[in-house]
Amino acid sequence: MTRLQEFTQGARDMLPMLLGAMPFGIIFGSLAGAAGLSAWQTLGMSLLVFAGSAQFITISLLNAGTGLIVLLLTTFVVNLRHALYSASLQPFVRHLPKRWRMPLAFWLTDEAYAVVLHRYTGSDVSPNKHWYFFGAALAMYLNWLLSTLIGVLFGKSVPNLSAWGLDFAMLATFIGIVVPTLRNSPQVAAALVAAAVALACYGLPYKLGLMAAAFSGIAVGVMLERRKEQMVEELA
């Protein structure tokens, strides 16, 4: 595939994720004003931070009058999952120059990772897969900015928008993407353990339950993969 074809395909494949993320961005734009952020500050956060979970946590902590240190620590813990994403994608992008890796790292979101990893693990050997990454990530970035703007402009005219449950669209989208990728028993076990730990640790402060779920899932997946390899070697 050519660069343009990869770019276009990436943006096209991101479409379901855009639809799931848009209500999330609209809600953020509508709630940020209540936390004391101006319209420009709200748009600036989406432009420069571009991390939905961290942005929601920030406005929640601002509403609670939380200090700067706690705010930074909490958002840092929440965004640690991106280190896992980066480690997973590193073998596919390490050959790229910094002018590529730096913007792609900034645009690496949950949604982009889900779509891009599927492309990188495809059987073809296209040398332009980073253009697919670029197209998918840029589409989500522009979508997030647009949805934030809609929330800023029209959120106040819709009372109690956050209670409408629109953010469920994001959860449904992720479930629909993750489930088909679980191709063997270690992957299924890792997903189930991570989900169980996330529920059990939901009440932990600073969103530590998120990291506990991630590391628990990884530990179970790695353990079962190694056991599976050992069994194969013994049978051979």
Image: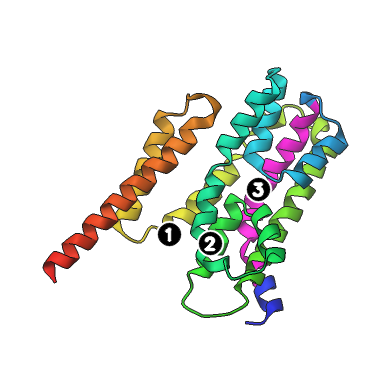
Q: Residue furthest left?
A: 235
Magenta span contains residue 12? yes
- The residue that label 3 is drawn on is 21
151 to 207, vertically: above or below: below
Considering only order in the chain, which callout, 1 or 2, is on the residue closer to the N terminus? 2
Label 1 crowd (10 A; few <14 / some 14-19 / many >=20): few
Q: Position of residue 232 (x, y in %)?
A: 18, 66
- The residue that label 2 is drawn on is 90
Magenta stretch?
A: 9-33
Label 3 crowd (10 A; few <14 / some 14-19 / many >=20): many
Magenta span contains residue 209? no
Q: Inspect the image, locate mark 3, and give the three-letter code of the amino acid beneath it.
A: Ala
Q: CA distance from mark 2 to mark 1?
A: 23 Å
214 to 224, vertically: above or below: above
- The residue that label 1 is drawn on is 180
Q: Inspect the image, locate mark 1, and give the three-letter code of the amino acid beneath it.
A: Pro
Which of the 4 image quarters holds residue 69? top right
Choose between 207 and 32: the one closer to the eye: 207
Residue drawn 71% across the image and 46% down it: 50
Choose between 55 and 84: the one closer to the eye: 84
